[in-house]
C-alpha cells in the first residue's frame, strides 16, 4: 500500500481539485475504472460549486497526497457532510493514474475514522451511487456498505453533468461500529 499524506482541502486547492474530480469522473484514462464518461457528459464540478461546498459549515473535504520526486501530488479526495444522525460520503475520487493501488480503500477508511473523531454521535455512513455502476456498488459492498430502499432521481438541475441514459441514485449505508 502507498503511504499517503492526508489533510483538509482549502481554497488554494480548488483549481487542482476541480481538475482531479472532473478527470476522475469524466475521463477514461490510465487504470481508470470509476469514470462515468459513457453515461454522463459535462463537468462533474466547477470552481464556484467547489468553493460554495467548501464554505458549508457541515462539510469537510479531505485530500490525499503522494510524495513523488520530492513534490506532493494530489491523488485523491473525499468529502464528508455531517447530517443529523449520519455522515454522507461524496466527492470521492482517485486520480486514474493512481487507481488500483489501494488508495481508494485507504482514503475511505481515513474518512470514516475522521468522521468518528469529528462527530462521534452519528449512527451511520451513507452515500449515493449511480444505480448502473454495478462494479462501484460491489466495491462499496466489499467495504461494508449495503444498498438501501432509497433510490432518487439524478439531479439534472444541480449542474453536475447531463445523463446520457436514464440514471438514478442508489443510496448505500453502513452502520457505525463503535468500540467500547
Image (spheres, grey):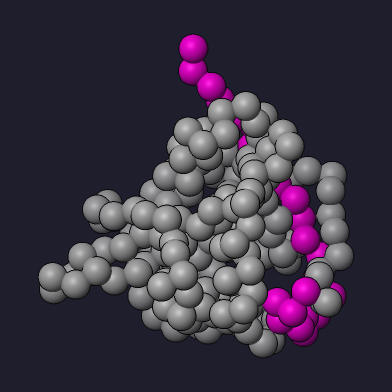
Where residue 87 sits in the image (x, y, percent)? 64, 42
- Image position of 49 with respect to 84: above or below: below
Name, please, the residue furthest toward the top. 180
- Image position of 75 with respect to 126: above or below: below
Q: Is residue 160 magenta?
A: yes
- Image position of 106 with respect to 153: above or below: above
Name, please, the residue furthest toward the bottom. 42
Q: Locate residue 92 relative to residue 5 in the image: left or right.
A: right
Where residue 40 sits in the image (x, y, percent)? 70, 81
Task: Write the residue at 34% across / 53% down.
Answer: 6
Q: Answer with the quarter of the image where residue 137 lies.
A: bottom right
Question: Magenta stretch?
Answer: 158-180
Task: Write the residue at 62% across / 27% down.
Answer: 121
Task: Write the residue at 39% across / 49% down.
Answer: 106
Please tell me how many numbered marks the rendered image carries. 0
Of 100 and 50, which appears nearest the observer?
Answer: 50
Q: Is residue 21 visible?
A: yes
Q: Answer with the quarter of the image where residue 119 lies.
A: top right
Where residue 170 sits in the image (x, y, percent)? 76, 55
Q: Is residue 159 magenta?
A: yes
Q: Locate residue 31 relative to residue 93 in the image: left or right.
A: left
- Image position of 7 with respect to 11: above or below: above
Where residue 59 sits in the image (x, y, percent)? 60, 53
Q: Is residue 138 visible?
A: no
Of 24 and 28, which appears nearest the observer?
Answer: 24
Task: Write the residue at 42% across / 44% down.
Answer: 110
Amino acid at each position: 500500500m502507498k503511504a499517503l499524506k492526508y489533510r483538509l482541502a482549502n481554497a488554494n486547492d480548488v483549481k487542482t481539485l476541480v481538475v482531479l474530480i472532473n478527470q476522475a469522473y469524466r475521463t477514461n484514462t490510465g487504470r481508470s475504472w470509476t469514470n462515468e464518461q459513457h453515461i454522463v457528459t459535462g463537468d462533474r464540478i466547477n470552481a464556484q460549486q467547489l468553493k460554495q461546498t467548501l464554505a458549508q459549515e457541515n462539510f469537510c473535504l479531505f485530500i490525499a497526497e503522494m510524495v513523488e520526486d520530492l513534490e506532493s501530488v494530489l491523488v485523491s479526495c473525499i468529502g464528508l457532510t455531517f447530517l443529523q444522525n449520519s455522515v454522507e460520503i461524496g466527492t470521492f475520487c482517485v486520480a486514474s493514474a493512481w487507481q488500483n493501488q489501494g488508495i481508494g480503500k485507504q482514503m475511505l477508511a481515513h474518512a470514516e475514522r475522521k468522521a468518528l473523531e469529528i462527530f462521534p454521535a452519528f449512527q451511520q455512513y451513507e452515500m449515493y451511487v449511480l444505480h448502473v455502476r454495478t462494479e462501484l456498488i460491489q466495491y462499496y459492498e466489499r467495504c461494508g456498505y449495503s444498498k438501501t430502499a432509497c433510490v432518487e432521481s439524478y439531479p439534472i438541475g444541480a449542474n453536475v453533468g447531463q445523463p446520457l441514459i436514464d440514471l438514478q441514485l442508489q443510496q448505500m449505508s453502513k452502520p457505525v461500529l463503535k468500540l467500547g
